[in-house]
Every structure is written in C-alpha cells, then in structure tokens.
Amino acid sequence: MQKKIILYISILSSIILSCKQETPTVKHQSMGGSTSSQLKNIKVVNKIDPICNMEVEGFLQDTILYQTKTYGFCSTYCKDEFKKNPEQYVEK
C-alpha cells in the first residue's frame, strides 16, 4: 500500500512539473544581408530578449515600437510572441 502511494505521488509530481510554463525553445537563424546591417545602429531599450533571454546586442534581428519605446529581439519568432502579450514582458 505504501509503495502504491509513493508511486502515485511520483507520477503526479512528474505530471505537475512537466506542465509548468517554460520559456519556449527558439531556433535562431541569422538573417544576414542588408537588413542585419540596418539594425546595427538602432537603439533599443532592452539588452536581453524578453522572450528567450538571449542578449540582443550583436544579435539584433527584429524590433518593435511599443508605447514609444523600441524593443529589440533576436528573431521574428520572439517579436511575434512579444506582440501576443507585451504587458507580460515589459519592465515596469
């Protein structure tokens, strides 16, 4: 009986832990070309991509203007995720 309880607890724990929300895994791809060189001179308010926590300096691939501030992202995927719920990622 005690072994069954321990088994149930361990199964339940693994289910709960696997369901917690985590930072999405992002496959970053270099855009290259003239777009990347155009982004080098843009000043953004964030040093870290709010979605994947990657440094954006030197890896800036996309930007968005939100509440008069320019935010930088390492990929279009991260920008699109930010656009879904910007208040979740904006520092207060």
Image (cartoon, grey):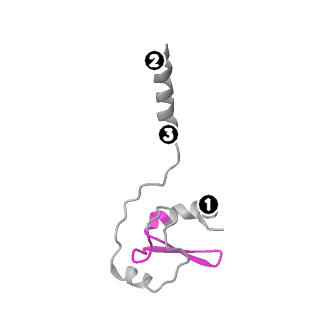
Identify the residue position indicated by label 2 in the image.
3
Q: Nearer the viewer, mark 2 or mark 1?
A: 2
Q: Please provide percent x and percent y for residue 69.
A: 61, 78
Is disc 3 in contact with disc 2, using a CB cutoff of under 8 Å? Answer: no
**What SS does tag 1 mark?**
helix
Q: Nearer the viewer, mark 3 or mark 2?
A: 2
**What SS does tag 2 mark?**
helix
Task: Report whether 46 appears left or right of 25.
Answer: right
Residue at 49 percent across and 13 percent down: it is 1
Residue at 51 percent across and 30 percent down: it is 12
Q: Please provide percent x and percent y for residue 30.
A: 34, 71
User: In the rendered image, which quarter contains the C terminus?
Assistant: bottom right
Q: Amino acid at mark 3?
A: Leu
| Among the 4 quarters of the image, the one containing residue 68 | bottom right
The dot on residue 88 is: 1
Mark sitting earlier along the chain (3/2): 2
Q: Amino acid at mark 2?
A: Lys
Q: Please provide percent x and percent y for residue 9.
A: 51, 27
Q: Amino acid at mark 1?
A: Gln
Residues 41 and 57: in front is 57
Q: Which stretch appears magenta?
A: 55-78
The dot on residue 17 is: 3
| Among the 4 quarters of the image, the one containing residue 87 | bottom right
Residue 62 lies in the magenta stretch: yes
Hey, which residue is sitting farthest bottom in the picture? Answer: 41
Q: Please provide percent x and percent y for residue 65.
A: 58, 76
Residue at 37 percent across and 64 percent down: it is 28
Mark sitting earlier along the chain (2/1): 2
Task: Report whether 7 appears left or right of 91.
Answer: left
